[in-house]
Every structure is written in C-alpha cells, then in structure tokens.
Amino acid sequence: MKALVLSGGRGTRLRPITHTSAKQLVPIANKPILFYALEAIRNAGITDIGIIVGDTRGEIEAAVGDGSPWDAKVTYIPQEAPLGLAHAVKIAEPFLNREPFVMFLGDNLIRDGIARLVKEFGESKANSQILLAHVRNPQDFGVAELDGDRVLRLQEKPQNPKSDLALVGVYMFDPCVFEAVNAITPSARGELEITDAIQYLIEHNYDVRYQIISGWWKDTGKLEDMLEANRLALDGLEPSIMGEVDADSRIYGRVTIDAGAKIVNSVVRGPAIIGSGCLIQNAYVGPYTSIYNEVKLLNSEIEHSIVLENSSIIDIGSRIEDSLIGKNVVVSRDNKMPKAYRFMLGDHSEVSVL
C-alpha cells in the first residue's frame, strides 16, 4: 500500500504567514504539521509516499528530504495549480501504479493516527473507505449522509447539511478511483472535487465504507483551528528541561525547554514548549504556548499562542494571547516622540490594539 500526501495548497486563510511559508510547515507544538502526517503514515506501516507539491515545493523538499527520517521513500509530484483533490489523485496515477493507497491532507492532524483504519481497509476489500467526524459546523466541510452502514451521499459545504458528519482529510482507495477522477468534471470553483469522485463510486455501485473517528481531529486551515490543534498537541506533552533555567525562574506543569534555551527571571506555566536558542527573560509564558527556535521574549507576557523562529517580542506592556506570530517578526514597544502606533504589515494581516 502507498500513501499520497497533499502539500500543494496556498493556505489563503493563514495569510500573511503563508505568503512566504508553506502552511503544512507551520509548527504545532514546535513540529511542522506535515511531519505529524508522515509519522501517522509511517506508523501505519506505509513507507512509499508521494507528496503533491505546488508553489512551495522547494520549502517542502528542504524540510522532508528523501523521507529517511521516517524510514520512508518520498517521491515529489508537482501540481501546476491547486485544481482539486481529485486532480491530485489523477496526476499521481503513475506513482500509485494501480496499488491501493491512503490519501492524507498535509494540514490535518489525527490524534490516534491511522494504523487501525488502514488495517481495516486492507482486510475489508472495499473500494474506498472514508473517515468521518462529528463537527459543530458541518456547513464548512464535506458532509456525509448515511443509510445504515452505507454511504448514501456526499455534499461539499452544503447550506443545509443532512448530518453533522464531516469528511476527515484522510481517504483510502483502490484503483477504481482512477475511473472516477477521470469521469468527473470540475465543480463551480473550477476544481475536481474528491467528494464528486467518491459520489461517482457510490452511484456506480462500488463498495464505499466509512469509519467514524472518536479521537480529536483538526483541519488547521484557519488561525483558530491551528491554535486549538496546538492546544490539543500540547496536552500530550512530555516534560523535558534541557535548557538553562536560573534560580529566579519558576516552571509549572508540563513544560519542554530544548537545549540551548535560557530562562532568566521568568515564569513558564505549562503545557508549553520553548525551542532551542530562545531567550526568555523577565517574561511570562502561559499555558498552551509554543515558542519555536531562536526567539527572544523580553519583559513581555504571552499565552495560548504560537511564535515562529527568529522572532522577538520586547517590552510589551500587555499580555499577548490567541496569536500566531510568524518568522523574523519584531513586536516591541516604541518610546519615540510623538507617541503613536507604528506598523509595517503585509497583506491580510490582522492587528488588535488596546
């Protein structure tokens, strides 16, 4: 069995972060989102992985390499434009070579992994297996309508959902799916939809089964989802203090401090993770915060946030919360006269001020 990981999307809902970075490489609990997918695939016993790449191909390849950190072989499959999930399957046919495969969206996280689900699919001899999860806002997802143990119908982001069961970003197929992706036509948004391909299988009497997952699942396409995924991942954090913590600092709860980080006259309250090379001085790091490598947090407070590498937060009088701060960002107090807010912000930025 092979795996197909989709990592070519533009991440428009996470701009401006994704103007310069692949959304699949934004870290959750200081690990790129994409790496969680690769670990889940490896733990399911699959080692032949194709990765669909787009504009951020260079960045994805630099991060993943040949797949050896996961004891896997990785093949990169370029997609000229984001033309839909079914289009990704279509162009991957030479790589998949008519073998059964699991398709995993590279910005999705599933707490319990997919090993059991892959095993059940292999034993079932079904043509396809989809994963479903109960959600509060089904109108924002592909939604499944069921009839007993059968999938009756799929709808993409329906205005009036027939159920609260959303399609999770993991799908399993046998070679019959290629008949479907070659038969369907683009949707109103100009994409070949995987929901249309699965609906084709259903209508042509192929065996499409489903599993409802019980553990948490997150599609990290929006800021609030990314912060929640970070919170959920940190809830399982194993404490580890490898960096330096001076006598005037206090560490509470589940906290990881990587080697090379320094905590000076500060309070860190977990669950939280602080990457290598960070300097946390005269500061407070609150629960559910991930601070990536080489960050400076001086005379400031932050919680329930994600800070990417090489950024600095200095002399901020109020606590920062519910925030995603990108790479090489400087957030600081400016004491110049006349006093004013002074910003240099990219497209699609959001700022809240007191």
Image (cartoon, rainbow, N blue to C red):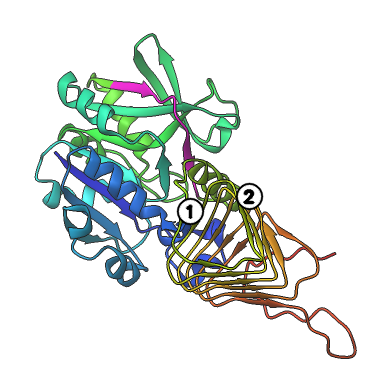
Q: Position of residue 213 (x, y in %)?
A: 41, 26
Q: Name the residue type under label 1.
A: Ala
Q: Earlier in the sequence, mark 2 or mark 1?
A: 1
Q: Position of residue 70 (x, y in %)?
A: 22, 53
Q: Say which element carries label 1.
A: loop
Q: Is residue 152 in view from this perspective?
A: yes
Q: Quadrant of the N terminus?
A: top left
Residue at 50% in and 65% down: 292
The answer to whether residue 210 is left or right of residue 159 is left
Residue at 33% in and 22% down: 210
- Residue, far bottom: 337
Residues in magenta? 209-220
Where residue 313 sits, quadrant-wise, is bottom right
Sort mark 1 into few (<14), some (14-19) or many (20+) by Cα contacts within 10 Å. many
Work out whether residue 268 or residue 217 is closer to the camera in this orientation and state it. 268
Does the magenta portion include 215?
Answer: yes
Work out whether residue 17 or residue 26 is closer to the camera in this orientation and state it. 26
Q: Position of residue 269 (x, y in %)?
A: 63, 52
Residue picked out by circle 2: 287
Q: Name the residue type under label 2.
A: Pro
Residue picked out by circle 1: 29
Q: Is residue 87 in view from this perspective?
A: no
Residue at 39% in and 49% down: 191
